[in-house]
Amino acid sequence: MKKLILATAILLSCLAITSAKAQIRVNVNIGSQPEWGPVGYNYANYYYMPDIDTYYSIPTHQYIYYQNNDWIRTSYLPSRYRNYDLYHGYKVVINDRDPWLRDNEYRERYANYRGRRDQIIIRDSPDERYRNHWDNGKHKGWYKNEGKEWKHKNKHDDEGDDEGDD
């Protein structure tokens, strides 16, 4: 009887450990995110752009916007947004499914982000996670010095160039 209880306890322990391991998932899609996307997110499904009330699907590379009583999915923004600057407009990361179906909720929740231009984007980040988006590790004045620390070349700094070591 003791052997049966011990064997059952061991079996249940193994199942619990296997179950716990199976629930650990790490999603990373940094390489799929556009260079105009915000920094700080290893994974993102959608960006919501409050300035133009438009969504961007990262997996499908499509914009989703409301037009003529329907949600349109296209690979480009409509002409009415042709002057919208993706690099400076604020983007909110949303990982919910089909967020445009709850557009009123997102529009209200993120209304205070309209007009903000202070978000750091992937293109301008020196973070190693975004290395695939860089131009050989040197971009927008960021470089590594001899100590391999990230530095930003001040535009008023006239000693040397902004190309450091990799």
Image (cartoon, rainbow, N blue to C red):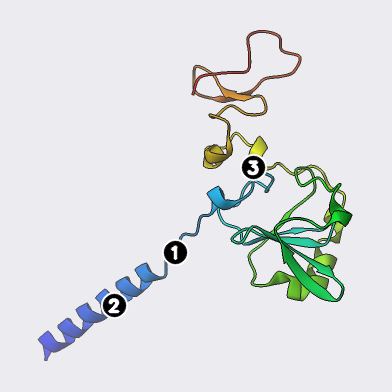
Q: Is the residue marked by circle 1 packed among few (<14), some (14-19), or many (20+) residues within 10 Å?
A: few
- Residue 20 pos. (x, y %): 37, 71
- Considering depth in this image, is 24 or 57 the residue closer to the camera? 57
- Considering depth in this image, is 144 or 15 the residue closer to the camera? 144
- SS label for mark 2: helix
- SS label for mark 1: loop
Q: In this view, does 18 lie above or below 126?
A: below
Q: In this view, does 29 lie above or below 24?
A: above
Q: How far apart are marks 3 and 2 (CA)?
A: 41 Å
The numbered dot on residue 25 is 1
Name which of mark 3 and mark 2 comes first in the sequence: 2
Check disc 3 and report the residue beneath it.
Answer: 122
Disc 2 marks a residue whose amino acid type is Leu
Name which of mark 1 and mark 2 comes first in the sequence: 2
Residue located 67% across and 48% down the image: 37
Check disc 2 and report the residue beneath it.
Answer: 15
Mark 1 in CB contact with mark 2 (< 8 angstroms): no
Disc 1 marks a residue whose amino acid type is Arg
